Image: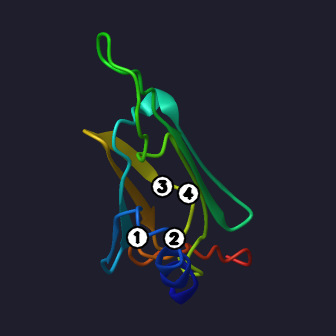
Amino acid sequence: MSALRDALRDLSEDVFFDLLESEDAYLLVLDVPGVSAESLDLAIDDGRISIDAHREKEPAGDYQYVEENRSLFLDVDLPLPDDASDAGAEATVDRGVLELTLPKRGAHGETTIDIVDEDA
C-alpha cells in the first residue's frame, strides 16, 4: 500500500482525498466537485487505478469568466495496493465525492477445499 500512499501524496494540492483501510478492504475517498457518474471514467488494469473525471462548467446568465481557477479535468493514475483485488471493487459518486472500495485478496474468510479420495 505504500506505493499507493506515495502516489496520492504526489497529487496536486488541489486534489483532496482520504485513504482508509480495514481488515477486508481499502477505501479511497476522492473529492471530484461537479462530477457525476456519467462524466467519470474509472478502470483498474495491469495493477493500476485510472480515474478520469471532467465536469461541465458554464457561466450563469450573462456572466463571462474574468478568471478561471477551478479545473475542469482530473486525470489520475495510481498503483493498486499489492494485497488488493480488482475483483469485487465498487465505486460510487455522490455530491462530488467518489468512494472506491478495493477488497483485499483472501479477505473473504477461510476457503475450505473438499478432498475426494479416488481410492474409496
Residue 112 in sight from this viewpoint: no
Numbered disc 4: secondary structure: loop
Front tag of 2 and 1: 2
Residue 108 is marked as: 1
- Which of the two discs, 4 and 2, labels the residue nearer the N terminus? 2
* Left or right of 1 on screen, residue 94: left
* Left or right of 53 on screen, residue 45: right
- What amino acid type should be assigned to the residue bearing mark 2? Leu
Numbered disc 3: secondary structure: loop
Crowdedness of circle 4 by 10 Å Cα count: few (<14), some, many (20+)?
few
Q: Are marks 2 and 1 in contact (CB under 8 Å)?
A: no
Of the 4 image quadrants, the one containing the C terminus is: bottom right
- Which of the two discs, 4 and 1, labels the residue nearer the N terminus? 4
Residue at left offset 42%, top offset 75%: 107
* Left or right of 118 on screen, residue 31: left
- Judging depth in this view, the residue of 66 and 74 nearest the camera is 66
Q: In the current view of this chain or complex, which residue is farthest to the bottom? A: 2
- Which of the two discs, 3 and 1, labels the residue nearer the N terminus? 3
Numbered disc 1: secondary structure: loop
Tell me where residue 79 appears, x and y as whole percent.
Answer: 62, 72
Q: Circle 3 is placed at which residue position?
A: 89
Q: Circle 4 is placed at which residue position?
A: 87
Task: Give me the C-alpha separation between circle 4 and circle 2.
Answer: 26 Å
Crowdedness of circle 2 by 10 Å Cα count: few (<14), some, many (20+)?
some
Task: Give me the C-alpha separation between circle 3 and circle 4.
Answer: 6 Å
Q: In the current view of this chain or complex, which residue is farthest to the left? A: 95
Task: Give me the C-alpha separation between circle 2 and circle 1.
Answer: 32 Å
Tell me where residue 81 appears, x and y as whole percent.
Answer: 55, 77
- What amino acid type should be assigned to the residue bearing mark 4? Ala
Q: Are marks 3 and 4 in contact (CB under 8 Å)?
A: yes
